Amino acid sequence: MTKSAQDGERQWFISGRWQEYEGESRANLLRVGGIAGFYLVELFNRAAVPPEFHHAVTALAAGWVMAAWAVHMCLRRRVFPAAMKYLSTGADLLLFTALLLLADGPRSPLIAGYFFILCLSALRFSTGLVRFASFGALASYLFVAGQAARVRPALAVGRNHELIVLLSLALCGVTLGQLLRRVRALAEDYARRREEAR
Amino acid sequence: MTPLDLCPGCQAPHGPDEAICWMCGHKFWKEPNAPRAAAAPEERAEPAPAVPPPPIARPGRRPFAAPPSAAAVEASARESAAALDRWTQPVLLVSFFLVLGGVAFSDKASGGGLLLLGLVPALFLLALSGMRPSTKKPETGMEWAAWVASKVAGAIAIIVLAGLAITAALFIACAVILAALGLWK
């Protein structure tokens, strides 16, 4: 690789890190907004759920907000390892799956939250993270569906239902990955046109 | 506040004790930092405004105290803003958990108490931040929206706090009067 190509890769890496930093901050803000929104829905629905479920969901929401606060403190104190995006997305998947296991599992409308986590992963402009979030969401959904089939058969869904959700998650991950791949081509085309216009 | 050093690779600010850039991984012992004079714009200290000369006291009269200079007022406002920022996060965190506890245990009597205990400091902070004068004029639509939201939230917080204070004062006054009349049960 020539020196100019190496410089170009280095500058692309630095730009990517800055966008990743900004994206992590925005994703954290959206994460807290999402937790607040879903918890408000839970509050409106409180009369229809047992008190133990409500307490468990409250504890889960509190733990999730603590995780978001920890991410916020790391970003403010300039602690920003490359693995942070994987840790925060992994925590999202883990806590969301725990929420589904408490709720109605594969029958719960909360399944749509996996797509929200996938979209959040794209904010960090990392195809590796989108891949991680996609496989993580697929594995989490399989775990939830499997748990319902074995332990709570009344909540299990049909095979076609499971396949449609899995296919939708996979396609969403692939589309987000393609979007990120187009970003570099867009940036290079823009830089070339600016250079030609001078 | 001393200006931070900037990484020569990515211009990210970093402290003097850091060996590797937290943003791009640049190793500082291989290439020195950008000079301190080229600090980030938000870290650059603004030049102090000119201090007006003190007023001349008339002979035979006691000299009156000069009004505080604009720089002193500005410094005082910054100090109080920094103090508010320092306390905001821990207080909001504690408030959040108290409110969550209040909501979670709202079927018990203690739930209402926890809710109130959690809401009051959060409302107080909202009221303070809403009353704080802005140091920078909003420029973009988002900044204007944030400014309006902070003012509206501050106003609502003040109204709610005033209502709570008046209610508490009336309750205490009624309790004292009833107790004095021997009617408190």
Image (spheres, coloured by chain):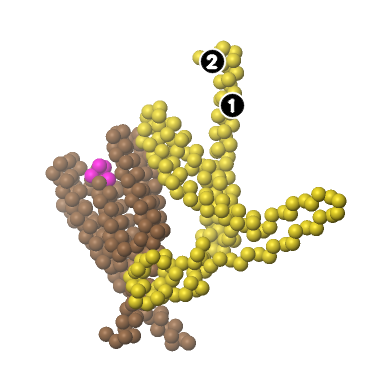
Chain colours: A brown, B yellow
Q: On the rendered structure, is B50 left or right of A68? A: right
Please state if B36 lies on the left or on the right of A42 as rendered.
right
> Quarter-wise, where is residue A103 in the image?
top left
Which residue appears at 39% of the width and 62% of the height? A78
Residue, disc 2: B184
In the rendered image, which residue does mark 1 sit on? B170
Residue A188: percent from the left, percent from the top?
Answer: 37, 80
Q: Residue at x 49, y 67 (%)?
A: B3
Q: Which residues are magenta?
A: A99-103
* Residue A124 higher or lower than B110, as above or below: below
Q: Secondary structure at mark 1?
A: helix
Rendered view: A8 above or below A141: below
- Residues A71 and A190: in front is A71
Counting from the top left corner in percent of width and height, residue A64 is at 33, 48
- In this view, the residue farthest toward the top is B182
Q: Amino acid at mark 2?
A: Trp
B9 part of magenta stretch: no
CA gap between label 2 and label 1 equals: 15 Å
Please tell me which of labels 2 and 1 falls first in the chain. 1
Which chain does tag 2 point to? B
Within 10 Å of disc 2 (Cα), the crowding (few <14, some 14-19, many 20+) is few
* Amino acid identity at mark 1: Leu
Coordinates of residue A34 in the picture (x, y in percent): 37, 51
Which residue lies at the image location 40% right of the left edge and 76% below the top edge? B32
